Image (cartoon, helix red, strand yellow):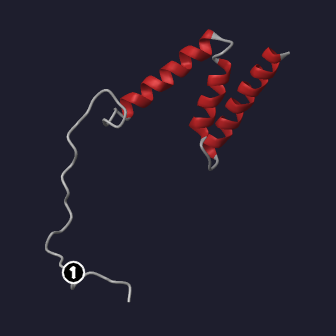
């Protein structure tokens, strides 16, 4: 009975995610959530979820915040020529 509920919930989330790809909403995240549920029961869902994670990592490599690779912090590029007299003080 639990297995049927997991399959139903996973497939439902994937179907909802497909609708959300064309409607406003987090379609890809919803599909990934459905695959995560199905991955507990099916190897094909686990493989597809791993593929999605790899694609995500190739588009958005780690930036050093909790990732294995660290890069130097970007320099501060604020305009240093603005002094206190020209800034807006809210009044």
In front: 80, or 11? 80
Q: Name the residue located 50 percent from the left edge and 19 percent from the top edge.
A: 50
In front: 16, or 33? 33
Q: Secondary structure at mark 1?
A: loop
Q: Name the residue located 22 percent from the left edge and 84 percent from the top edge.
A: 86
Where is 3 relative to 14, above or below?
Answer: above
Horizontal side of 1 relative to 22 (left or right) equals: right
Label 1: which residue?
A: 84
User: Residue placed farthest to the bottom in the image?
Assistant: 91
Q: Quadrant of residue 77?
A: bottom left
Q: Quadrant of the N terminus?
A: top right
Where is 66 relative to 20, above or below?
Answer: above
In front: 8, or 15? 8
Q: Name the residue located 61 percent from the left edge and 17 percent from the top edge.
A: 45
Q: Could you tell me how many numbered marks the image carries? A: 1
Q: Quadrant of residue 49?
A: top right
Q: Name the residue located 20 percent from the left edge and 40 percent from the top edge.
A: 72
Q: Quadrant of the C terminus?
A: bottom left
Q: Where residue 22 sits: x, y (%)?
A: 62, 44
Q: Where residue 63 sits: x, y (%)?
A: 31, 37
| Mark 1 crowdedness (10 Å alpha carbons): few <14, some 14-19, many ≥20 | few
Q: Where residue 54 sits: x, y (%)?
A: 43, 23
Q: Where residue 19 sits: x, y (%)?
A: 68, 40
């Amino acid at each position: 009975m639990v297995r049927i509920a997991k399959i139903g919930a996973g497939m439902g989330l994937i179907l909802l995610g497909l609708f959300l790809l064309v409607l406003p909403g987090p379609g890809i995240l919803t599909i990934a959530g459905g695959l995560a549920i199905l991955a507990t029961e099916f190897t094909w869902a686990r493989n597809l979820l791993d593929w999605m994670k790899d694609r995500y990592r190739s588009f958005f490599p780690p930036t050093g915040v909790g990732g294995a690779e660290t890069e130097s912090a970007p320099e501060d590029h604020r305009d240093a020529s603005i002094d206190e007299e020209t800034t807006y003080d809210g009044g």
